[in-house]
């Protein structure tokens, strides 16, 4: 059975801290891994990763994939209160044609 | 206006009632999805459709049905609602060329008493 496991499930940090969110997966015929940010409403797309070792970066956020060890990390540097959200990891397999989501990591950034 | 619109945004109903959640999109995407989100469980796929004539069950389709009335419209029905269907429901779209990037509606919060 395909599955995606995120850790930690929740995290509280202070502004300025750096955080690392983890996503491991077991998927047959892996195709891609995606990260989404969910604030109060709809999830919004952050990154899609398909190749190992190639970092994707957007501002203070970055992500990398390790297809040998079957995991990805999402790093957020110099956190701000606006980074408070649920971060969702999802994986797409070649056979499934849809995304399988992890349970998410709830990040709270305190002033 | 939002590219992916869900109605109603909030609904409270009683056990046994029939409920329809509607989704319409102006993005011109062929692929549409219905997910439900429960606290601590992430997003789980209910049904998906790759075009008007294509409907597929997802991970948790029992108790739900869907209708793809047009490329832009995808409705989710609960024929006889039960309390454990209380959840936040999201509609999402994706281009036909399978980018993996989903575009979500704002969600429909359903409470079944």
Image: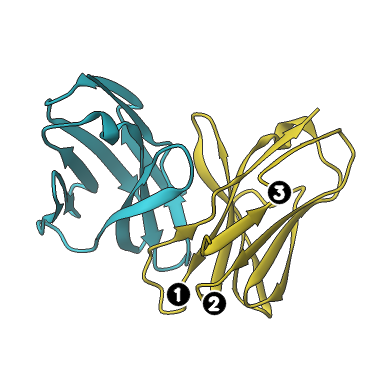
* Residue position marked by numbered label 3 in the rendering: B8
Image location of residue A103, percent across then percent down: 43, 36
Q: Earlier in the sequence, mark 1 or mark 2?
A: 2
Mark 1 — residue? B95
Mark 1–mark 2 contact, CB under 8 Å? Answer: yes
The answer to which of marks 3 and 2 sits earlier in the sequence is 3
Q: Is residue A53 left or right of residue A102?
A: left
- Residue sticking out furthest to the right: B16
Q: Position of residue B46 (x, y in %)?
A: 63, 53
> Same subunit under labels 1 and 2?
yes
Q: Residue at x 52, y 78 (%)?
A: B28
Q: Tell me the SS state at disc 3.
A: loop
Please give the letter of the chain rendered in yellow.
Answer: B
Query: Depth-wise, is mark 3 or mark 2 nearer the camera?
Result: 3
Q: Quadrant of residue B30?
A: bottom right
Q: CA distance from mark 1 to mark 2?
A: 6 Å
Q: Is residue A4 left or right of residue B93?
A: left
Q: Residues within 10 Å of mark 3 (few under 14, many from 20)?
A: some
Chain A, colour shown = cyan
Residue at 23% over, 63% down:
A50
Instruction: Answer with left or right where residue A100 lies relative to residue A25.
Output: right
Whole-angstrom CA distance, mark 3 to mark 2, is 22 Å
Pointer 2 residue: B30
User: Callout 1: few (<14), some (14-19), or many (20+) C-alpha neighbours within 10 Å?
Assistant: some
């Amino acid at each position: 059975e395909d599955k995606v496991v995120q850790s930690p499930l929740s995290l509280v940090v202070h502004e300025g801290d750096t955080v690392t969110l983890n996503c491991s997966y077991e998927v047959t015929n892996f195709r891609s891994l995606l990260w989404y940010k969910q604030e109060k409403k709809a999830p919004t797309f952050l990154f899609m990763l398909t190749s190992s070792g190639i970092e994707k970066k957007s501002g203070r956020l970055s992500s990398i994939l390790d297809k040998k060890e079957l995991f990805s990390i999402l790093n957020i540097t110099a956190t701000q209160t606006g980074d408070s959200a649920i971060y969702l990891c999802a994986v797409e397999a070649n056979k499934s044609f849809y995304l399988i989501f992890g349970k998410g990591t709830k990040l709270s950034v305190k002033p | 206006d939002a590219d992916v619109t869900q109605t109603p945004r909030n609904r409270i109903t009683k056990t046994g009632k029939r409920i329809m959640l509607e989704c319409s999109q102006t993005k011109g995407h062929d692929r549409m999805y219905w997910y439900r989100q429960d606290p601590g469980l992430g997003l789980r796929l209910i049904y998906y459709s790759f075009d008007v004539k294509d409907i597929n069950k997802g991970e948790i389709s029992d108790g739900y049905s869907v209708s793809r009335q047009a490329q832009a419209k995808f409705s989710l029905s609960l024929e006889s609602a039960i309390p454990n269907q209380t959840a936040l429901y999201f509609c999402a779209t994706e281009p036909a060329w399978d980018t993996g990037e989903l575009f979500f509606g704002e969600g429909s919060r359903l409470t079944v008493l």
